[in-house]
Image (spheres, rainbow, N blue to C red):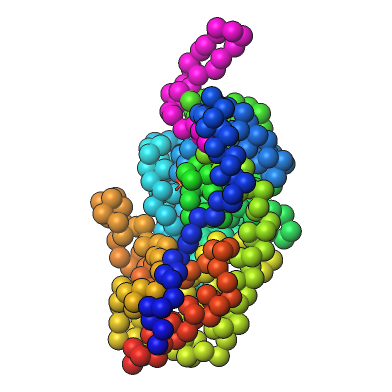
């Protein structure tokens, strides 16, 4: 077995091309390194892509909180979301003083189950935060029908879904608030960063105020502060990285789809499938393939997930966990959540593994990953 002869394959590797690196050097030499002309260009490009007003921020996390603030959501209000996400989604609900309400996922899409979402609506419900895990969007027509009937705001956590679409409409081009992240591991990156798509100029103005200390400037020397904003602006260095990355979005999405197709081809008829591993939905029209995640049949294996990941690492392959269920974290158990409440999220959160998928990978890399999975499953099957 060629266990150590090949270079280590991480589960993700950020991609910054040479043109972008040169562009960053030019920004550093320009004399304007924090929010300025590059950020204005990045915002303009994102606004063009979405066809709606977009403002940039220094993280995807803060955009979720700012959308909730713009919507006037706070203490006494309930916000419904999925337990299977990065914890920042529900942390932002808590940060604005609102109450997180979880609804379980659909085990196939691993996104919010819209029937469960409807069942979770109460007179206190004010908003929904759907999360497009791995870039798989949900039925946006039904989601917005539910939102309209119950007069709920929607903050789409599309941190992983830039480049995804629903029925031919790209995520970000329709709906209510849409939040993107440009963290180093996302499909496009500004190292750290995020963007919020809003509905109109008034909301865009508010987003700008929340982004920088609640300040509005007028004329040469006018300045007013009329709301409690924070410090969430994106630097021009980061914006230049984001611009270089955004220019390659279509190319990146196409390459991710090619690699995902290769995963399906290699897994077809394999020992791993026979043993019961679950693949993601084979979606080649909507998903941007942010991740390729398998669910391990732990009840049929003699090892736990951590051991599976260690065995992959021993074969030179990195894996990840996205994510443990939020409601089982201490902070949320202290709010009354606990085991047994959201069985699909709990099983999948316990058994999900992210395999390598990034545009610089080759089909041979995919074959190597699937071979390693098969070897381990074969060896530890009971
Ligand atoms: C990455 C991510 C976030 C947060 O984005 P940051 O830019 O890291 O703050 C939120 N939700 C989901 C689902 C994410 O994947």
Dominant SS in magenta: loop
The C terminus is located in which quarter? Answer: bottom left
Q: Nearer the viewer, residue 146 or 8?
A: 8
The N terminus is located in which quarter? Answer: bottom left
Residue 43: which quarter of the image?
A: top right
Q: Nearer the viewer, residue 231 or 94?
A: 231
- Residue drawn 69% across the image and 53% down it: 170
Q: Nearer the viewer, residue 246 or 351?
A: 246
Q: Is residue 284 above or below residue 334?
A: below
Q: Residue furthest top?
A: 221
- Residue drawn 37% across the image and 42% down it: 94
Q: Is residue 253 above or below residue 123?
A: below
Q: Nearer the viewer, residue 213 or 332?
A: 213
Image coordinates for residue 315, horizontal then vertical, percent: 38, 78
- Residue drawn 59% across the image and 51% down it: 17
Residue 11: which quarter of the image?
A: bottom left
**What number of labels is visible?**
0
- Residue drawn 48% across the image and 45% down it: 191
Residue 268 within the magenta-colored segment of the rendering: no
Image coordinates for residue 207, horizontal then vertical, percent: 55, 31
Residue 215 within the magenta-colored segment of the rendering: yes
Q: Is residue 193 above or below residue 359?
A: above
Image coordinates for residue 12, horizontal then vertical, percent: 47, 62
Q: Magenta region: which residues?
A: 213-237
């Amino acid at each position: 077995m060629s266990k150590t002869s090949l270079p280590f394959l991480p589960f993700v590797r950020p991609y910054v091309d040479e043109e972008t690196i040169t562009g960053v050097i030019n920004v550093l030499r320009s004399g304007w390194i924090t929010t300025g002309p590059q950020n204005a260009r990045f915002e303009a490009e994102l606004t063009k892509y979405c066809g709606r007003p977009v403002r940039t921020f220094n993280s995807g996390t803060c955009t979720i909180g700012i959308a909730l603030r713009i919507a006037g959501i706070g203490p006494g209000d309930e916000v419904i979301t999925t337990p299977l996400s990065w914890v920042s989604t529900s942390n932002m609900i808590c940060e604005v003083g609102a109450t997180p309400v979880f609804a379980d996922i659909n085990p196939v899409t691993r996104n919010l189950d819209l029937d469960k979402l409807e069942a979770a609506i109460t007179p206190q419900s004010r908003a929904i935060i759907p999360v497009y895990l791995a870039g798989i969007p949900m039925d946006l027509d039904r989601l917005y029908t539910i939102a309209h009937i119950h007069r709920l705001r929607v903050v789409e956590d599309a941190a992983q879904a830039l480049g995804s679409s629903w029925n031919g409409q790209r995520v970000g081009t329709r709906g209510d608030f849409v939040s993107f992240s440009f963290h180093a591991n996302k499909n496009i990156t500004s190292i750290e960063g995020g963007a919020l798509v809003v509905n109109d100029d008034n909301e865009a103005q508010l987003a700008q105020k929340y982004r920088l200390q609640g300040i509005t400037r007028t004329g040469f020397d006018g300045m007013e502060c009329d709301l409690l904003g924070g410090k969430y602006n994106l630097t021009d260095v980061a914006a230049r990285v984001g611009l270089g990355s955004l220019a390659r979005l279509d190319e990146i999405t196409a390459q991710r789809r090619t690699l995902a197709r290769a995963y399906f081809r290699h897994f077809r008829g394999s020992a791993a499938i026979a043993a019961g591993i679950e693949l993601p939905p084979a979606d080649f029209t909507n998903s941007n393939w942010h991740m390729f995640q398998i669910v391990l049949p732990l009840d049929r294996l003699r090892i736990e997930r951590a051991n599976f990941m260690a065995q992959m690492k021993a074969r030179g392959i990195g894996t990840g966990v996205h994510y443990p269920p939020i409601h089982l974290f201490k902070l949320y158990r202290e709010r009354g959540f606990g085991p047994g409440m959201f069985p699909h999220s709990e099983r999948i959160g316990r058994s999900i593994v992210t395999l390598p998928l990034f545009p610089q990978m080759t089909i041979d890399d995919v074959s190597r990953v699937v071979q390693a999975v098969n070897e381990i499953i074969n060896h530890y099957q009971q």
